[in-house]
Image: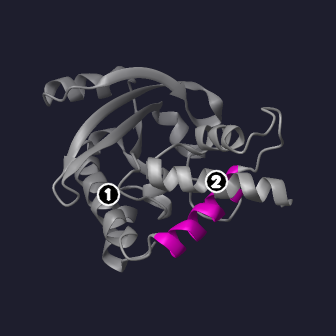
């Protein structure tokens, strides 16, 4: 990675960890923060993730493991509540780079995409619907909820990305680093039991 991309990745990583920004937004803000042209070549997400891991190791090593565990416990609680929608945890909470500023992302795989909304309504859960890019860039419904983490003592963003059941087949292919990009309830339980990143 060239020096400029490395600098953008480092600044973006700080914003991801300290402000809870998503990688894309953090890269754009890093470019602006550094006074670069908006057309500057950006580091890819793997480069930003490596910078996030480095930032956490240097500046957050004493607090991040407990914060990550709290987020994973909260995610598991919601995965169990939403079990009928085949939830899979993804993002920083799954990969082990989450801090208290990170949101939780659950992918739901439903026979009927509207069933998740109906399920939340039946549970008395207030949510904010929107459309986002899902797997393979297809637009999907995202249901956003603010949930309280007793361990962190604050509310956390929980985003439920609603996919068709058929999308589950391609959702577990390994990423560029050979890792599973998301995990089901059993996989999250193993992470919590093993204490892994």
Q: Residues within 10 Å of mark 2 (few under 14, many from 20)?
A: many
Residue 124 sits above or below residue 53 on the image: above
Percent position of residue 152, x then y? 23, 58
**For the residues bearing labels 2 and 1, Cβ distance under 8 angstroms:** no
Residue 140 higher or lower than 161, as above or below: above
Closer to the camera in the image, 99 or 125: 99
Q: Disc 2 versus disc 1: distance between alpha carbons?
A: 24 Å
Label 1 SS: helix
Q: Residue furthest right?
A: 2
Write down the region rendered in magenta: 45-59
Q: Which residue is located at x 77 percent, y 45 percent?
A: 42
Residue at 28 percent across and 56 percent down: it is 76
Quadrant in the rendering for residue 109: top left
Left or right of 161? Residue 15 is right
**Which quadrant of the figure contains the N terminus?**
bottom right
Please identify the residue farthest to the front as the structure is shown: 35
Whole-percent x, y for residue 181 in the image: 56, 55
Disc number lying in front (2 or 1): 2
Percent across and percent down for residue 50 are 65, 64
Is 53 inside the magenta-drawn segment? yes
Using the image as rendered, state which of residue 51 and residue 44 is in the foreground. 51
Would residue 152 appear left or right of 157 to someone viewing this image? left
Give the mark count. Answer: 2
For marks 2 and 1, the one nearer the N-term is 2
Task: Answer yes or no: is residue 183 visible.
Answer: no
Q: Which residue is mark 2?
A: 11
Of 175 and 63, the residue lying toward us: 63
Magenta span main SS: helix
Residue at the spot 49% in from the left edge and 62% down from the top edge: 97
Which residue is under mark 1?
71
């Amino acid at each position: 990675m060239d020096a400029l991309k490395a600098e953008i990745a480092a600044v973006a990583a700080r914003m991801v960890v300290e402000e809870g920004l998503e990688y894309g937004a953090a890269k754009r803000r890093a470019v602006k923060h550094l006074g670069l042209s908006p057309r500057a070549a950006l580091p890819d997400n793997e480069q930003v993730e490596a910078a996030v891991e480095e930032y956490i190791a240097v500046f957050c090593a004493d607090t991040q493991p407990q914060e990550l565990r709290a987020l994973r416990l909260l995610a598991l609680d919601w995965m169990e509540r939403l079990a009928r929608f085949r939830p899979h945890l993804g993002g920083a909470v799954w990969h082990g780079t989450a801090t208290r500023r990170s949101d939780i992302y659950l992918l739901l795989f439903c026979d009927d995409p509207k069933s998740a909304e109906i399920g939340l309504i039946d549970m008395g859960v207030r949510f904010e619907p929107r459309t986002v890019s899902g797997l393979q860039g297809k637009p999907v419904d995202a249901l956003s909820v603010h949930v309280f983490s007793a361990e962190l003592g604050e509310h956390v963003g929980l985003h439920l990305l609603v996919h068709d059941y058929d999308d589950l087949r391609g959702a577990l292919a390994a990423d560029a680093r050979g890792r599973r990009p998301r995990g089901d309830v059993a996989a999250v339980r193993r992470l919590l039991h093993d204490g892994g990143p």
